[in-house]
Image (cartoon, rainbow, N blue to C red):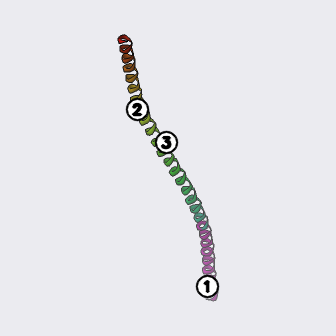
Amino acid sequence: MTSSNNQDNNDIYAILTELAQRQLQAQTQLKQTQAEILETNLTVRELTNDVNRFLARGAVLDNVVMELRDAQAVMQINKKVMQRNFEQHQRNEGNALLHY
């Protein structure tokens, strides 16, 4: 019976040893996975910051383009007004010379 007990004890010891090795492997893999998650989080944060900066620049450029379009429209109106004023001035000058 003692040899049977010794064999059982050896089997239990072998099983415990294997379980301990598996646990160490699992802990090592867990640490590696946690490190990878941290690295991925940093990368995602950096990419998010890049995207936010890009979008902010895009919004600024959109505003600049709108202001340029508005300025161009105002300049077109001013050009038409100046052209009419010039034509009116020429007519007035021509009339003044005729009546002189």
Of residues 17 and 84, the one drawn nearer to the viewer in this rendering = 84
- Between 35 and 12, the one lying in front of the other is 35
Q: Residue at x 43, y 32 (%)?
A: 72
Q: Which range of residues does the magenta coloring cover?
A: 1-30
Q: Which residue is disc 3 drawn over?
A: 61
Neighbour class for label 2 at 10 Å: few (<14), some, many (≥20)? Answer: few
Q: Quadrant of residue 33?
A: bottom right
In the image, residue 40 lies at what x, y percent?
A: 57, 58
Distance (Cα) linking label 2 and label 3: 18 Å
Quarter of the image where one finds residue 82: top left
Residue marked by disc 1: 4
Residue 28 horizontal/vertical position (percent): 62, 68
Residue 77 picture quarter: top left
Which-is-in-front pick, marks 2 and 3? 2
Residue highlighted by disc 2: 73
As displayed, is residue 1 above or below residue 88?
A: below
In the visual, does 42 lie left or right of 55? right
